[in-house]
Image (cartoon, rainbow, N blue to C red):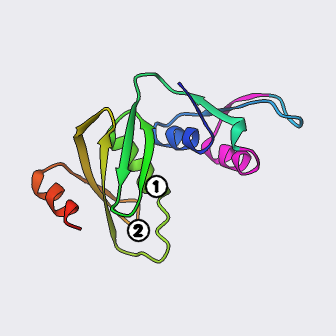
């Protein structure tokens, strides 16, 4: 499955993969593009960046009670880490709680929290945490 643009960059970061770049008028096609390089290229034209992800990937929805985003990932945990690392905390300086759900199997969920001030991601999968998250 071919991922392009920011979705490809998110996947590459979450799964420690390099990316590819299509040729353009100024440069030939390239392989082994780092996520950092890809972000710079994508800021000009996101359609130049791509990655071939295995078809066994899952589609994951992540909701934080304000927004819901969708990711391709190898696992709920990988999607959660990608979400947390790309989250725009703005003025928020506390913990953000969210839930990752396998879109093909909505009963398969993983609750997680992450700090707006650090790279810490804490995972939980017990019913009590899920219930508390849904009451937010």
Residue 43 within the segment the image draws in magenta: yes
4 vs 120, nearest the viewer: 4
Where is residue 49 drawn, in percent x and y? 67, 37
Where is residue 61 drawn, in percent x and y? 37, 45
How crowded pointer 1 is (Cα within 10 Å; few <14, some 14-19, many 20+) is rated as some
Say left or right for 134 vs 118. Answer: left
Residue drawn at 23 percent across, 38 percent down: 108
Where is residue 120 drawn, in percent x and y? 35, 59
- SS assignment at label 2: loop
Name, please, the residue furthest toward the right: 25
Q: CA distance from mark 1 to mark 2?
A: 10 Å
Residue drawn at 44 percent across, 50 percent down: 69
Residue 105 within the segment the image draws in magenta: no
Name, please, the residue furthest toward the left: 128
Residue drawn at 34 percent across, 60 percent down: 64
Residue at mark 2: 116
95 above or below 84? below
Which numbered marker is on residue 85?
A: 1
How crowded pointer 2 is (Cα within 10 Å; few <14, some 14-19, many 20+) is rated as many
Q: Quadrant of residue 128?
A: bottom left
57 vs 123, nearest the viewer: 57
Residue drawn at 47 percent across, 60 percent down: 87
- Magenta residue span: 29-45
**On the rendered image, what quadrant is the C terminus found in?**
bottom left
Question: Counting residues from the N terminus, which is met first, the one under dot 1 or under dot 2?
Answer: 1
């Amino acid at each position: 499955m071919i991922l392009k643009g920011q979705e490809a960059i998110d996947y590459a970061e979450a799964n420690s993969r390099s990316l590819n770049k299509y040729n353009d008028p100024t440069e030939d096609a390239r392989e082994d593009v780092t996520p950092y390089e890809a972000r710079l290229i994508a800021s000009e034209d996101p359609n130049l960046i791509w990655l071939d992800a295995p078809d066994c990937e899952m589609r994951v929805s992540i909701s934080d009670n304000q927004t819901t985003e969708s990711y391709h990932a190898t696992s709920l945990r990988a999607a959660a880490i990608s979400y947390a690392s790309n989250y725009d905390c703005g003025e928020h300086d506390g913990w953000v709680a969210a839930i990752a759900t396998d879109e093909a199997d909505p009963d398969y969920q993983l609750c997680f929290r992450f700090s707006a001030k650090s790279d810490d991601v804490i995972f939980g999968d017990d019913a009590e945490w899920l219930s508390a998250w849904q009451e937010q």
